[in-house]
Image (cartoon, coloured by chain):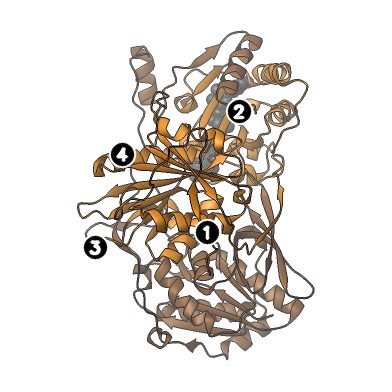
C-alpha cells in the first residue's frame, strides 16, 4: 500500500513547545492513546501506567500519542499517568472509524522518530491498526497482552491468554523496532493520577491526508435491551433473591434508566425470569461490563467466574454473609424489591427529565 | 465473484488444555481438531456469495498434513477447491509469518474477496487477516457481522462489530479482505450429495518453498504456562475478627474488600448508591 504524501510541522499553539522531536536511534516508549466521550479510555490508561514501569526500567522517555478529531482538551492528562511527552495531532480526518488515516499518520511518526516500543490498548481501532502497522513496518507484534516486560537483551516479552484463557503463552518480539504489543483490557492497574505532573505537549499538524480505502458510513448505537450480554457495557443481573417474576419489571425499569442490559444467575434462568443466553457463569456467558449490579445473587463460584472481571460491582442482598459481597465495590444490605425501585426513583430525580442518551 | 477463504484447524474447544511444564508445551495427544469456528462462518459467507453471484470458492490452509481433514470438510460445505500448504512448524510461527505465506499463495489465485475468520480460538491473535490485507494492498474491515455485495459486484457494504452492541457501517471497493465475526451467519450442515462429491476431490498441495517467501516470523514463542492464579481476597483490618473468619471460610476467590456496605431506609440507601454511580461516571 502506498503511503500518502505527508509533512509534519510543529505548530505554535497553547501548550506547544517548539523543539526537535527527532530522537537518535530507537529510543523511547510510545503509547497510542484513545479517547471516548471526552475521556481517555481506561485501557489506554492501563497501558500507559504499565509503560511507565518499562520506561523507568530502560531509563527512557515515555510518549503518549494522542490523535483524533477532538482530542486537544485531553492533552494534559497523559502526563498525570506518567507520560513525559504528548504528541498531539487533531484533525477532522482522524475520526475514530478512519483506520486508514490513523495508519498513515502513525507509520510516518514512527519512521521519523524511531521509538523502541509502541503499545496499544486492545480496542476496535487498535485491532485493525496495530497488525497493519506492524506488517507495514515489518516488526513483531503480540496482541491482547496480559503482561509486558523487557528482557535482559532488550526484547519486548509479552504474555497473553491462549486457548480461550485456559493457558498463557509468552512471546518475544524480534529486535526490529518498534517492538509492538496491544494490551488487553482489565489486566493492568491504573495508578491514581498525579495532577502536578507536567509533560511536554508537542502539537503536530497534519498537512496532507493519505488515501482512504474504506469509507465510513454510519455508527449504529447498541440497544442494551437486545445486545448480547457479552457485549453489554452495564449489566443488572438477578438471582433467586428476585423472588418472583412480577418483580422483573422493577429490574427492567432500573436497567432502562441506566442503559444497562439484564442478565441472571442459573437460578434466574431456571425460573424462567431471564432467557438462557443471558445466564452469567460457568455454564453461561463470561462477561466483563463496566458495571455489574448483582440483585439477590449469592455469589457461588460457578456464577462469579463469569463476572469477576467486571469493572465496578454493586451487590444488593439481604444476607450480610453472601459471598457476593466480597466482590463488591459497593454493597447494599437490603431487599431487592425495595432497594431497586428506590434507586430507580432517585435516578429519575437526578437525571430528570430522562436525558436522551448521547452516543 | 472469486473468493479465497483462509481457514485453519484448531483443537476441539471441548478438550481440556493442560500445560506440560517440562516440555514447555500443551498436552495435545488426545486432542482432535475442528475448523476454527470463525473460519467456518467465513466459509459459509463465501458459499452464500457464490450461490448469489457465481464464481469459485477456494479454501487455503497452512498447517500439518492432518489439516487436510478440515479442508475436506470445507469442500463438503461448498468450497470448490482446497489448497494445503504443508508445514509442521506452523504453530511456532507468528501472525506475520503465516500471513506472509498465505498472502503469497493468495496473490496467485483470482480473488475478488478474501475472507478470514476474525480470530482463531487457540492463539487468538486477531491479526492474520489484517496483515494479509496489508501485504496484498487490499482494503480491510475486520469483525464483520453483515456483508452486502453491491449488485454490480464492485463494492461491499459491511457492518463491523464494535463494543457494547454498537456497529460501524462501512463501504469498501472490491477486491477487499473481510474477517468474519461469529454473528455473521449460521454455518450449514453438509448435505449428502456434497459429502459424496467432496470425498472424490483432490486436496491440492502447495510447497512453501515454491512461494518465494523471504521473511520469517517477527516474534518467537518463549513459554506456555497455566493461567496465573486469581488474586485471593485478603481481609483488611477494617473488618471485625468474626467477619474476617466468615469471609475467609465463605469460599471462592475474590479481590475486593466489602467494607463499603450501605444499609438503612431504601430512599437513603438509594441516594448513596446514585451518588456512587454518578461519581464513577455511570450516569452520563
Ligand atoms: C456444574 C455447575 C454449573 C453451574 N453454572 C452456573 C452458571 O453458569 N451460572 C450461575 O449463576 N450458576 C451456576 N451454577 C449454580 C450455582 O452453583 C448457584 O447455585 C447459583 O449461581 C445460585 O444462584 P443465585 O445466586 O441466584 O441463588 P442462591 O444461591 O439461592 O442465592 C440467592 C441470594 O439472594 C439473596 N436474597 C434472597 N431474597 C432476597 C431479597 N428479597 N433481596 C435481596 N437478596 C435476597 C439471598 O441472601 C441469597 O444470597 C452452576 C452449578 C453447577 C453445579
Q: Disc 4, disc 3: CB below 8 Å?
A: no
Q: Secondary structure at mark 2?
A: loop
Q: How far across and down, in percent of the image, does residue A174 sit? A: 30, 62
Q: Is residue A2 something that shows in the picture?
A: yes
**How many numbered marks are there?**
4
Q: Secondary structure at mark 1?
A: loop
Q: Earlier in the sequence, mark 4 or mark 1?
A: 1
Q: Which chain is orange?
A: A
Colour assignment, chain B: brown
- Structural crowding at the residue carrying mark 4, measured as other residues with C-alpha within 10 Å and reported as few (<14), some (14–19) or many (≥20): some
Residue that mark 1 sits on: A6
Q: Nearer the viewer, mark 3 or mark 2?
A: 2
> Does mark 3 fall on the same chain as mark 1?
no
- Structural crowding at the residue carrying mark 2, measured as other residues with C-alpha within 10 Å and reported as few (<14), some (14–19) or many (≥20): some
Q: Nearer the viewer, mark 2 or mark 1?
A: 1
> Does mark 1 fall on the same chain as mark 4?
yes
Residue that mark 2 sits on: B282
Q: Disc 1, disc 3: CB below 8 Å?
A: no
Q: How far across and down, in percent of the image, does residue B89 sit? A: 34, 74
Label 2 resides on the chain identified as B
Residue that mark 4 sits on: A53
Q: Disc 2, disc 1: CB below 8 Å?
A: no
Label 1 resides on the chain identified as A
Say which quarter of the image contains residue B247.
top left
Label 4 resides on the chain identified as A
Amino acid at each position: 500500500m502506498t503511503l500518502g504524501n505527508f509533512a509534519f510541522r510543529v505548530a505554535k499553539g497553547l501548550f506547544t513547545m517548539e523543539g526537535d522531536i527527532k530522537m537518535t536511534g530507537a529510543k523511547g516508549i510510545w503509547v497510542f492513546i484513545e479517547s471516548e466521550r471526552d475521556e481517555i479510555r481506561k485501557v489506554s490508561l492501563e497501558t500507559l501506567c504499565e509503560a511507565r514501569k518499562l520506561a523507568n526500567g530502560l531509563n527512557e522517555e515515555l510518549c503518549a500519542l494522542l490523535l483524533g478529531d477532538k482530542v486537544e482538551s485531553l492533552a494534559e492528562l497523559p502526563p498525570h499517568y506518567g507520560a513525559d511527552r504528548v504528541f498531539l495531532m487533531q484533525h477532522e480526518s482522524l475520526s475514530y472509524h478512519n483506520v486508514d488515516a490513523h495508519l498513515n499518520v502513525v507509520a510516518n511518526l514512527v519512521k521519523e522518530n524511531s521509538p523502541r516500543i509502541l503499545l496499544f490498548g486492545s480496542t476496535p481501532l487498535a485491532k485493525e491498526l496495530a497488525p497493519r502497522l506492524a506488517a507495514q513496518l515489518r516488526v513483531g507484534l503480540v496482541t491482547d497482552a496480559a503482561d509486558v516486560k523487557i528482557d535482559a537483551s532488550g526484547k519486548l516479552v509479552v504474555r497473553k491468554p491462549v486457548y480461550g484463557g485456559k493457558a498463557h503463552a509468552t512471546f518475544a518480539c524480534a529486535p526490529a523496532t518498534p517492538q509492538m504489543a496491544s494490551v488487553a483490557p482489565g489486566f493492568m492497574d491504573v495508578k491514581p493520577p498525579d495532577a502536578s505532573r507536567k509533560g511536554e505537549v508537542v502539537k503536530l499538524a497534519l498537512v496532507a491526508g493519505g488515501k482512504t480505502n474504506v469509507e465510513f458510513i454510519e455508527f449504529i448505537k447498541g440497544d442494551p435491551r437486545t445486545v448480547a450480554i457479552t457485549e453489554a457495557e452495564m449489566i443488572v443481573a438477578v438471582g433467586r433473591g428476585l423472588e418472583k417474576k412480577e418483580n422483573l419489571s422493577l429490574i427492567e425499569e432500573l436497567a432502562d434508566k441506566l442503559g444497562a442490559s439484564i442478565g441472571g444467575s442459573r437460578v434466574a434462568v431456571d425460573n424462567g425470569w431471564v432467557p438462557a443466553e443471558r445466564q452469567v457463569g460457568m455454564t453461561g456467558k463470561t462477561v466483563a461490563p463496566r458495571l455489574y449490579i448483582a440483585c439477590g445473587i449469592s455469589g457461588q463460584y460457578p456464577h462469579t467466574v463469569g463476572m469477576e472481571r467486571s469493572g465496578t460491582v454493586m451487590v444488593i442482598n439481604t444476607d450480610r454473609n453472601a459471598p457476593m459481597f466480597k466482590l463488591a465495590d459497593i454493597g447494599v444490605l437490603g431487599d431487592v424489591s425495595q432497594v431497586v425501585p428506590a434507586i430507580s426513583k432517585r435516578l429519575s430525580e437526578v437525571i430528570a427529565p430522562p436525558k436522551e442518551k448521547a452516543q | 465473484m472469486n473468493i479465497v477463504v483462509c481457514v485453519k484447524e484448531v483443537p476441539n474447544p471441548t478438550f481440556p488444555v493442560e500445560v506440560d511444564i517440562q516440555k514447555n508445551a500443551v498436552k495435545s495427544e488426545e486432542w482432535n481438531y475442528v475448523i476454527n469456528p470463525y473460519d467456518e462462518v467465513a466459509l459459509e459467507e463465501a458459499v452464500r456469495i457464490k450461490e448469489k453471484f457465481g464464481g469459485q470458492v477456494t479454501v487455503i490452509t497452512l498447517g500439518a498434513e492432518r489439516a487436510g481433514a478440515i479442508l475436506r470438510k470445507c469442500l463438503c460445505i461448498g468450497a470448490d477447491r482446497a489448497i494445503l500448504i504443508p508445514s509442521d512448524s506452523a504453530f511456532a510461527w507468528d501472525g506475520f509469518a503465516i500471513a506472509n505465506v498465505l498472502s503469497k499463495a493468495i496473490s496467485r489465485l483470482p480473488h475478488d474477496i478474501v475472507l478470514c475468520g476474525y480470530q482463531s480460538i487457540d492463539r487468538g491473535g486477531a491479526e492474520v487477516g489484517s496483515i494479509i490485507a496489508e501485504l496484498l494492498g487490499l482494503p480491510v474491515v475486520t469483525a464483520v457481522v453483515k456483508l452486502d455485495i453491491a449488485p454490480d459486484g464492485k463494492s461491499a457494504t459491511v457492518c463491523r462489530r464494535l463494543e457494547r452492541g454498537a456497529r460501524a457501517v462501512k463501504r469498501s471497493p472490491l477486491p477487499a479482505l473481510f474477517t468474519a465475526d461469529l454473528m455473521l451467519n449460521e454455518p450449514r450442515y453438509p448435505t449428502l450429495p456434497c459429502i459424496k462429491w467432496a470425498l472424490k476431490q483432490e486436496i491440492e498441495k502447495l510447497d512453501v518453498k515454491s512461494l518465494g517467501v523471504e521473511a520469517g516470523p517477527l516474534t518467537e514463542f518463549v513459554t506456555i504456562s497455566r493461567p496465573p492464579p486469581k488474586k485471593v481476597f485478603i481481609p483488611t483490618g477494617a473488618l471485625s475478627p468474626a467477619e474476617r473468619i466468615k469471609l475467609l471460610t465463605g469460599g471462592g476467590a475474590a479481590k475486593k474488600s466489602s467494607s463499603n456496605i450501605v444499609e438503612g431506609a431504601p430512599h437513603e440507601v438509594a441516594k448513596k448508591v446514585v451518588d456512587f454511580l454518578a461519581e464513577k461516571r455511570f450516569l452520563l
